[in-house]
Amino acid sequence: MTTVQQDSQVIVVGAGISGLATAYALARVGCRVLVLEQSPRVGGFIRSERTPEGYLIEHGPNSLLNLNPDVDHLCGELGLDRERVIQQSSSRRRYLVKARTLVPVPSRACQFPLTPLWSLKAKLRALAEPFVFAAPPEGDESVGSFVRRRFGPEMVDYAVEPFVAGIFAGDPEQLSMASSFPQVAALERASGSVVGGLIASRLRRGRSRRPVQVFSFRGGVGRLPETLYSHLGDRVITEARVVEVRREGRDGAVRFAVHAETRDGARAFIADRLVVASPADVAGRLLFPLSPPLADELEQIPYAPVGLVHLGVARSALSRFPDGAGCLVPKRERLPILGSLWSSNVYPERAPEGRVLLTNYVGGVRDSDVLKWSDDELVALVVDALRDLVGLSGRPEFVRVLRHPRAIPQYLLGHRARVAKIDHWLAPLSGVYLAGNYLHGVSVRDCLTQGAALADRIVGDIKRVENPGSASLSTPPSPVSAMQYSS
């Protein structure tokens, strides 16, 4: 027997960071919102775990970046500023692997001419970028094509390819520049040069530019979804697997019945509006009865697989371990890892005294079958690579392997056209909204900003329908509006 629940203004399906950010912003302005999450916990891949051995490991993202002021504002409001830990200054150096050797990435312009990462010819070609008049091709352009056109071919292999593998676990020859790095593509459109556009942008901002920080929290990045959850309270129901969504006409208006299997049995939740904040393929399956063409577009968005191999070792077991945040590995190096993050260098208290935590990434589009290997095989691959790179000797004292078969959405060539089709098929479904990192940005900060902007849009729609001519909701809003988080 299905129990019918009380009405809500908005139901959010999915308590990943996008769903939580949307729900929190709605709740803060007095909207009656309910979040349904299939798993026993919130946050999706964002999870931090203190192991019995004393290591603090991340199941997903390791850091946040306050590139948008929204991130600082939200952390302050949630009370997380008190828990914030900034990347340690000694770890700001980063490395690329070349000829199986760690080479520091230049962090200042004056270091660029001296680095062995690129040939003299490649450096001269990159420095000439402001004077290159190469018109972009018609239609979408790949990241690899864009960089070759602006900076030369060598910058793809030993700069952009490992960088793209680190962010998207993707291939620069397949990813869309306009969708993956829209701000960089916009610099060329506005100034005719990426470097020239960057200089002009910095001059315009002048001294008012906010300091950009890489940071986490004492308990890890997982503290962010945990804290959002605690603020939402009983507005979130975990272990609620949504099995069907129906549109129903009632009192002359269209409403949504969301049927879910919960710990208390089958339940139907009724709402005026529906936010689907699940991964693209799950969203497609849920929305198929409402719009098969929309579902088809959603289910075609690919994801890259990523594995995390956490290793805890004695510092004395690393004979060539430098200061720094970690390294990225270009595809040309033919090593079995995408990169290695030296977590205990970046933040304090990530490993016991005298120990080091190395978080290593495998898989991606580059090696999509690697997650089929056993844990022992993956650990052996990673240990082998680290022997060459950091002089690892012996066996690790701590090992944890995590697998995400569908980790990061890929913004392939044509992604903007696909998003436009999604918007086209979504438009007739009045009251249905989509949220997630498969649309307009994969980072946590993108999800926070877009979730709050979506909440602001929903609030506007509710006001127009329920309160024509009035600026307030039926419940008094908080002094903090959703607009404060939108970009």
Image (spheres, rainbow, N blue to C red):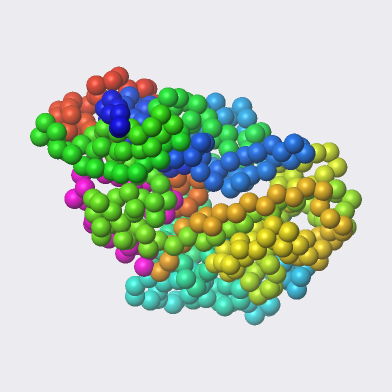
Q: Number of marks in the image?
A: 0
Per the image, is 425 magenta?
yes
Residue 406: percent from left, percent from top: 50, 56
The image quadrant where one finds the N terminus is top left
Taking depth in this image into account, of 159 and 225 the one nearest to the observer is 225
Taking depth in this image into account, of 101 and 45 the one nearest to the observer is 45
Question: Is residue 404 shown left or right of residue 241?
Answer: right
Figure quadrant of residue 127: bottom right
Figure quadrant of residue 248: top left
Question: Is residue 211 shown left or right of residue 15?
Answer: right
The image quadrant where one finds the C terminus is top left
Residue 328 visible at all: no
Question: Is residue 318 shown left or right of residue 422?
Answer: right
The residue sitting at 36% across, 41% down in the picture is 242
Residue 92: percent from left, percent from top: 70, 50
The residue sitting at 65% across, 38% down in the picture is 49
User: Residues in magenta?
Assistant: 414-440
- Up/down of 265 relative to 65, above or below: above
Residue 153 visible at all: yes
- Up/down of 218 relative to 191, above or below: above
The residue sitting at 54% across, 26% down in the picture is 79
- Residue furthest toward the front? 1
Per the image, is 196 magenta?
no
Residue 407: percent from left, percent from top: 52, 55
